[in-house]
Every structure is written in C-alpha cells, then in structure tokens.
C-alpha cells in the first residue's frame, strides 16, 4: 500500500489523523508534520504504538510519502506548504488538500503541483471538530478521476461518513462548494443568534425556543443553540471555529458573489457581527460568538 503523510494539525486535522490510523488499514506508519512539532509529537504518542512517525520538516514528510494530505488554515499557509514541498522531487506523488481556500487558490495549486509531475485532488471537508474525531465528516473530492479514486479508500468509512463526488471536474469546484456551503453555517448561526435574542427580549424565553429547535432542527442547529445557551461561545479559551477563519471564508464568499454579479447580504451582516466578536474576544473569538454580538446590539451583555 501507499505511504501516507499528513501535514497540518488544526482542530480538524488531529481527528482526521486519528481515524486514518485507526480505521485506514495502513500497512506503513502515518508520517505526521506540523509547524509546531509538539502537536505532532503529542498526537503520535496518543495513537497506537508503531502506527505513526513525526517528521521534522515538510521536505522529510513529502520525500518519504506517496500520498500527502494537507489541512492548513488559509490560502497563504497552503501556498507556503506546497511551495516548500515542491522544492524536492515530487514526481508521481499525490497531494490531497483538505484546506478551506478560495477556488482560485485551489486551481493555482493544481497547476503548480501537476507542473511538477505530481497529482492533485481537492478534498475540503464539512463538519465540526467533534465530527472529525468521530469520523463523521463529509468530503468533497474533485480532480482527475484516476487521482480521486486513489483518495476514496481513505475517506468514506475511514475519516468521513460520506463524499460528494466531483470526479473529473476542476479541482476548484470542490472549494467553490466548500466556500458556498460555509455560508450556510454562518447564516445558521446568525439566524439562531437573532432568534434567541428575540426570544429573550420578547418574553418567550430561550429555553422554549431551544425546545422548538431540538424538535424541528436536530443536528447542527441544536448543537449551536446549545453552545449559545450554555455560554460555551464565550467561555472556551480555544475556539472551535475561529473568528479569523470564519471571516476568511466570508471574504471568499463575498468576493465570489461580487465577481459573479450578485450579493450575499446575509453573509455581509454575519461578517459585521464577526468583526464585533473579534473586537470583544480577539483571536479566541468563535463563530458562535455572533450570539454575543447580536446581544450587544439589543442592549444586552455579550456574555449571557
């Protein structure tokens, strides 16, 4: 079987690596690299003995691998990662990028990687960190059919529960769907925030509204509603969906809309609230903190 490497250990990456090792039927240890090496070392220690190894550089990870998964925070980070990877010999290797970036960035990555004699598949993911831990993510695969087929054995039933198959379509289509899909998450959080503030101010009560949400909209809506009412949106030190990453996604979406001759007015409102979250919480701000921003606009405290 192929030798796999994983580059990037954010909130999602750790869970994906864990499932890849535990469910991927790998016959060679997974090579792990992270810019902060301690994260890679800590993860390797938590995995079954002999099932992973830690690389000290991107070049080391790539040089030893046949298939390289990348999952980093933004467009600049993935460009830096791939530029470093392509300094060595990459002919015949397959790069699989799970990052959420602008579709134009994905297309440029595809050109650079294939130009170096390697293969490329875009593989952005939908889901929260808890879903990554439980292997419940949804993957979008795009790129040459032959390359996508090499990636599929590691997705459904391993690090994810399902795939959206764009085999044979340009790689950028996968991240285009990812960016548009993430506007649904932003709009969901905005809707829940406004609803809970209205429920509190009008006298309905947030618990009554939450009961309705649990009954009508189980799943992500209920999960985010719970995070809001429990105060998780302002209590945690490390965000689940960082405000800076959420704003990056919003900027990409608004840019795509403008280039396409339309507007995403809901996203514009959500981004304005995310700006308030950043001012109040700094880098520790979470997308669910939109609830606090809407509360502030209504004359309530940010923290419930």
Image (cartoon, rainbow, N blue to C red):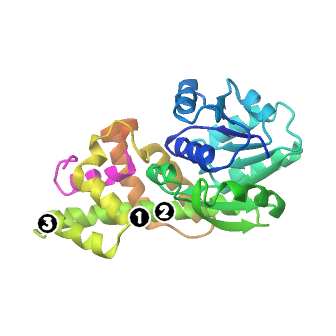
Q: Which mark is residue 183?
A: 2
Magenta-colored span: 286-304
Q: Is residue 181 visible?
A: yes
Identify the residue at image location x=54%, y=33%.
43
Residue assigned mark 3: 205
Tag 2's secondary structure? helix
Contact (CB < 8 A) between labels 1 and 2? yes
**Spatial CA span between label 1 and label 2:** 6 Å
* Front label number (3 vs 2): 3
Q: What is the secondary structure assignment of the residue under circle 3?
A: loop
Q: Which residue is mark 1?
A: 187
Q: Residue at x 31, y 76 (%)?
A: 216
Residue 4: x and y, percent? 73, 41
How packed is label 2: few (under 14 Cα within 10 Å), some, or many (20 or more)? many
In the image: residue 290, left or right of residue 261: left
Where's residue 236, x and y in %?
32, 40
Choose between 11 and 101: the one closer to the eye: 11
Instruction: Please name the residue shown 83% across and 60% down the image.
Output: 146
């Amino acid at each position: 079987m192929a030798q796999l490497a994983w580059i990037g250990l954010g909130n999602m990456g750790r869970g994906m690596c864990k499932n890849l090792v535990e469910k991927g039927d790998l016959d060679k240890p997974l090579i792990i690299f992270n810019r902060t090496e301690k994260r890679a070392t800590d993860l390797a220690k938590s995995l079954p003995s002999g099932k992973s190894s830690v690389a000290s550089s991107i070049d080391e990870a790539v040089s030893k691998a046949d298939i390289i998964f990348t999952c980093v925070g933004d467009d600049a980070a993935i460009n830096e990662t791939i530029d470093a990877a392509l300094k060595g010999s990459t002919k015949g290797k397959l790069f699989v990028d799970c990052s959420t970036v602008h579709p134009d960035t994905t297309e440029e990555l595809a050109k650079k990687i294939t130009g170096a004699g390697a293969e490329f598949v875009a593989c952005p993911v939908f889901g929260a960190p808890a879903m990554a831990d439980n292997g419940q993510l949804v993957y979008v695969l795009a790129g040459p059919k032959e390359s996508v087929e090499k990636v599929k054995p590691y997705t459904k039933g391993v690090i994810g529960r399902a795939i959206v198959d764009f085999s044979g379509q340009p790689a950028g289509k996968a991240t285009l769907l990812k960016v548009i899909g993430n506007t649904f998450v932003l709009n969901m959080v905005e809707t829940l925030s406004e609803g809970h503030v209205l429920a509190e101010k009008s006298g309905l009560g947030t618990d009554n509204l939450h009961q309705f949400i649990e009954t009508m909209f189980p799943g992500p809506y209920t999960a985010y509603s719970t995070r809001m009412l429990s105060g998780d949106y302002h209590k945690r030190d490390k965000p689940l969906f960082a405000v800076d990453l959420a704003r990056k996604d919003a900027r990409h979406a608004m840019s795509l809309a403008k280039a396409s001759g339309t507007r995403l007015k809901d996203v514009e409102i959500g981004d304005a609230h995310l700006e308030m979250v950043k001012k109040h919480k700094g880098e520790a701000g979470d997308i669910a903190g939109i609830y606090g921003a809407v509360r502030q606009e209504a004359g309530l405290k940010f923290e419930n």
